[in-house]
Image (tube, rainbow, N blue to C red):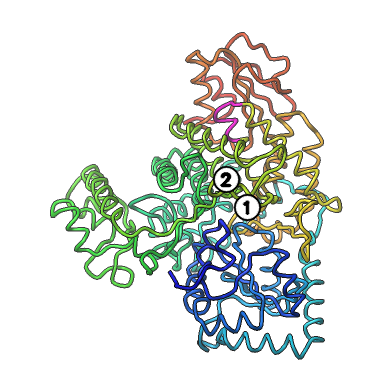
Amino acid sequence: MSENPPNRLSREVSPYLLQHAHNPVDWYPWGDEAFARAREEDKPVFLSIGYSACHWCHVMERESFEDEEVAAVLNRDFVSIKVDREERPEIDSIYMQAVQIMSGHGGWPMSVFLTPDALPFFAGTYFPPDDRHGMPSFRRVLAHVADVYRSRRDDVSRVTAEIRDSLGRSLSADAGTQTPSQDDLESAARGLAANHDSVNGGFGTAPKFPPAMTLDFLLQVAARRSDPTLLEMVTITLRKMANGGIYDQVGGGFHRYSVDARWLVPHFEKMLYDNALLARLYTRAWQYTRIPFFARIANEILGFVEREMASPDGGFYSTLDADSEGEEGKYYVWDHSEVVEVLGEEDAPYFCALYDVTDRGNWEGKNILNVPRDRETVASSLGISVAQLEDAAARGKCGLYGRRSNRGRPGRDEKIIAAWNGWMLAAFAGTAMAFDSETWRIVTKKNAGFLIDRMMEGDRLSRIHKDGVSKFGGVLEDYAGVAWGLVAAFEATQERRYLDTAHTLMKSTLARFRDPGDGTFFDTPDDHETLIARPKELFDNATPAGNSVALDVMLRLALYFGEPELDRAARRGIAAISPLAQRYPSGFGHFLGAAEWAAGKPREIVITGDPSKETFADLVRLVGRMYLPNRIFVAGNDHELPILEGKPRDRVAAYVCEGYACQAPVSSPEGLERLLGQHD
C-alpha cells in the first residue's frame, strides 16, 4: 500500500473506495461537502466511478491516481469525487448516460467532469498516463478541462444545458398503451434468434456476455410453442458456456464475460449477479429438458456461491476480482507440468485430454481449463470408458482445487447488495424446489432472514450492508429484487413472512417509485436526494432492470393476494415499455418474460392437507421439479390467502386453476402431472 496518509475515503465501507484511501488524490465521497467546496472555490469536479472488480479501474489507479504529479494537478485545479457504482447505481446511471451522449460509448472507469452544480460538461472512461493509440493522456485531459472551465464558461454552459435536455429525453419512456400479445412475443423471439451463433452459442460476436435473461425468455417461448429450434438455441448456448473457459471448471461459477466468440478466454472477475441469473437458468433448463449436465452446473454454481461468496450471517458478497498477485487470471490458469505434478502420471493424461491442457497452453502460454470435445469422444480416443474418464476428471478437479487454494486469492468485495442478494435468493429457492434440496433450502432461509432482519426497517430497505452496518436507501432494483427473491423463498419453504414482506416492498414501490405519467417506475424514491435528473432504467442490461422485476413480481403478488390494482399497475407498466422491447428485444430479456406472464394464463397451484403425509410431500416435489414458469404455488393449511378460499383442508389434495377456472382436485402425483400437462 502507498505510504500516503489516508484521505477521506478511509472512513467509507466500500472496498472500492477503500482501495483509494491512500492515494495522494484528495478524494471526497459523493456528498454535499465536495460540491460546497467546488462552489466556494469555483472549481470543476472530477467524478471517477468504478467498482472493486474492475480491471481497468485498478490500472488507472496505478498509473494516475497513485502518481504524485497527477494528484497535485487534481488537488490544485479540481475537487475530486470517487463513487462505487455498486453502492450508488442511481448516480452511475445518470452519468453513464451523459458519458454515452458525449463520447458515443461508455464503460468503467468512468471519468466525468462536472460544474459545481453537478452538471457534466466533459466525459470519458479510461485515460492512459501518456498519449497512446489515439487516446490523450490523463494529464493532457486535465489541463484541457481546467482551461476550458476557466476561460470558456459560455461553452461549458451550452454543453451542460444540452446534456441536461438530452438526459431528460433519454429517461422518458416512449409509452405504449397495449400489453404485447403472444404473437408479439414470438416476433421478438424470432428477432433474437436471427442473431444466434449456431456454432458457438450465444448471440453476435466477441466479446460475449452470458445472455441469461434472453435465454430464459427463449426457453419460455420454446416451451409454450414446443419449438425445437428455439430450444436448441438455448441448449447449445448453455452447453458451450458451461464447457468453456468462462466457466470455472475447477471451482464452479461463471466469470463475467468471454473476450472471444467461443467462450474460451474470460475476463476473470466473478459477479454475484451473473451466477444468480445463470444458476436459475440452468435449473429451469433442467426442469424442461431433464438434461443431467444442466442440473450439475446449477448445483455447482450454488456450491461455489455458498463456499466462497456467503457471509457467516447469511448475506452474499458481491464480487471476486479478476486479478490476483497483480496479474489478471493468475489464480485460475495452469501450467501443464503443474497439472501432471498434482494429478500424477495415471490421471493426468486423461484429465489433460478432457480439459485441453497442453505444454503449449491455450492462453499466453498457460492453460485455461475448458472442454472442447464431448466426453464420449475423448474417452473413445483414450481407449477408456466414459465412467473412467469421469472418475479421473473428478479426482483431478479435487486435486487442482486444493492446489489452487494455496495461491494468492483474488480480492473479494464484501459489500452485501440488496438487489443482488434478492436475485441469488431466487436462484437458491428455485433450485431447492427443483431438486428437493434441504441444503439449499437452509441457505434460502438464512439469506431471506438476513435481508428482512438486517436490511429492512418497516417498509424501507437499505441497499448496502457491510461490517454490520446497513446504509444507503434502497433503489428500485433493490425493492424489486428482494421481493422477487422472497416470493421464490416462500414457494420453496412456505414461510408466510417472506410473502408478506414481498407484498410490503411492492406496496412501498407503488407509493414511492411510480411515475404517474406512464405507470413505469423511477430508479429512486420520491424522498431521495435531488440529482440532476431522476433516473429510470428500462433496459435489462447485465442485470434485470428494476422495472422488469417489479412488474414481474406485481403480477405474481396480484394473484397471491387477490389484488386487481397490483395486476392493473403491472399491466400498465408492461404496456408502456412494450414498444421499446419490441424494437430492441435483446435489451429486454427479463421484461419479455414478464410480458409472457401477462399474455398468457398463469396457473394457481394449491396443495392442501397434512404436510407430514408422504403423498403431500410427493405432490410438492412434483411441482418443484416441473418447468412451470408462470405459476404461483401454495402448500399447507396455515395460509389465509384468496386462492385457498373454499378449498377443503382436511385431506391431501392438489388444485390447479387457470384463467379463473379450476380443475377437479387430484390426490396423486400422477393425477397432478396429468393436470399440469407435462411428463418426464
In this rendering, the label closer to the viewer, 2 or 1: 2
**Residue sitting nearer the eye, 343 or 258:** 343
Please give the range of residues in magenta. 488-495
Task: Report the amino acid beneath label 2.
Answer: Trp
Q: Which residue is pictured at 49% across the width and 20% down the height? A: 618
Main SS class of the magenta portion in the image: helix
Question: Residue 291: horizontal and vertical position, in percent?
Answer: 42, 41
Question: Residue 671: horizontal and vertical position, in percent?
Answer: 55, 19
In the image, residue 97 above or below residue 272: below
In the image, residue 129 above or below residue 244: below
**Residue sitting nearer the eye, 58 or 652:** 58
In which image quadrant can residue 45 be found? bottom right
Is residue 233 in view from this perspective? no
| Disc 2 + disc 1, Cβ < 8 Å | yes
State how far apart marks 2 and 1 are (Cα): 9 Å
Q: Which residue is pictured at 62% across the width and 79% down the height? A: 75
Element under label 2? helix
Q: Which residue is pictured at 71% across the width and 42% down the height? A: 460
Residue labelled with disc 1: 544
Residue labelled with disc 2: 423
Task: Report the amino acid beneath label 1.
Answer: Pro
**Residue sitting nearer the eye, 671 or 209:** 209
Mark 2 closeness class: few <14, some 14–19, many ≥20 residues within 10 Å: many
Element under label 1? loop
